[in-house]
Image (cartoon, rainbow, N blue to C red):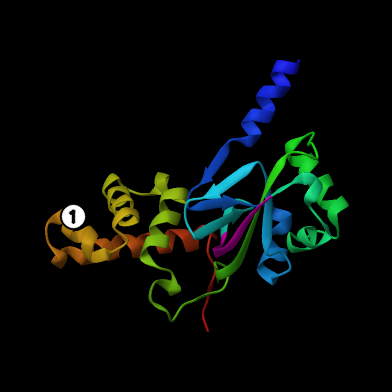
Amino acid sequence: MAAKENKEVGNREKTKYLGRHIMIKRKFIEKMLSGEKISTIRLGRVKPKYKEMIVHGGGRPVAKILITSITYKKVKELNDCDARKDGFKDKKELLNELKKVYGEISPEDTVTIIEFKVLQRFDELKSEDPYFGLKPVDIARLGLRYLKDLLSEEDIKILESLTRTKSIRKTALKLYGSPEKRGAIRRVLRKALRLLRAKGLIHVSDI
């Protein structure tokens, strides 16, 4: 039993890396979008690889965020202020939620506090903006996450390349040897946008 407990503690202390995407529970979405929730607290040492991330919850993309700070604490060092930033009433309510998610936690366990601000909501996109105001690279990331079963192999290849180059021009040059082929990249982006909208994954205002 002791060996098992030591292994669990060791796993919790290992640094876990986050990529471009982060998940939150459906019940916290509105709090995040309203600004009531400006942080997320995760058990263990968590290190995001990027400052900008896409938040997902309830089976859809919710928003693009900018990470403003990362703090490591012991569970016993958490306070009511930490809890309120994460959308909870107080520390007790926060700890109850952490136990629901992770099971038993120790006062000596490390937690990571990731503070952020919302850069872009995916339920308030503007129809008059190019690509509804989304960056091509973000359309590519959303398309690859939610639309793979609806895209051709060529579409997927284009979107995967775009996530690496972050540029329509560079993607055209890399895949087709000429920046004049940018139209092919744009067509795939517009297709991905249509599908994301049709599936209710993004919402566009027709103002």
Task: Please check the rendered image and state whether residue 67 is part of the magenta-colored stretch, yes or no.
Answer: yes
- In this view of the protein, which residue sits in the foreground, 93 or 61? 93
Among the 4 quarters of the image, the one containing residue 75: top right
Relative to 129, residue 185 above or below: above
Magenta stretch mostly in which secondary structure? strand
Q: Compare residues 115 and 23 and report the one nearer the observer.
A: 115
Q: What are the residue bounds of the magenta stretch? A: 62-72
Q: Position of residue 204 (x, y in %)?
A: 52, 72
* Percent position of residue 29, x then y: 68, 60
Local secondary structure at mark 1: helix
* Residue 124, quarter of picture: bottom right
- Crowding near the residue tagged with mark 1, few <14, some 14–19, many ≥20 C-alpha atoms within 10 Å: some
The residue sitting at 48% across, 49% down in the picture is 19
36 and 150: which one is in front? 36
Residue positioned 38% across, 57% down in the render: 140
Q: Residue furthest bottom?
A: 207
Give percent across and percent down for residue 199: 51, 57
Q: Between residue 103 and residue 191, name the one nearer to us.
A: 103
Q: Is residue 118 left or right of residue 35?
A: left
Whole-percent x and y of residue 202? 53, 64
Residue 84 magenta-drawn?
no
Residue at 44% x, 73% y is: 132
Q: Quadrant of the N terminus?
A: top right
Q: Residue at x 84, y 54 (%)?
A: 91
From the image, tell me which residue sits under label 1: 174
* Type of amino acid under label 1: Lys
- Residue furthest to the left in view is 177
Report the number of discs: 1
Taking 195 as reference, is 154 above or below it? above
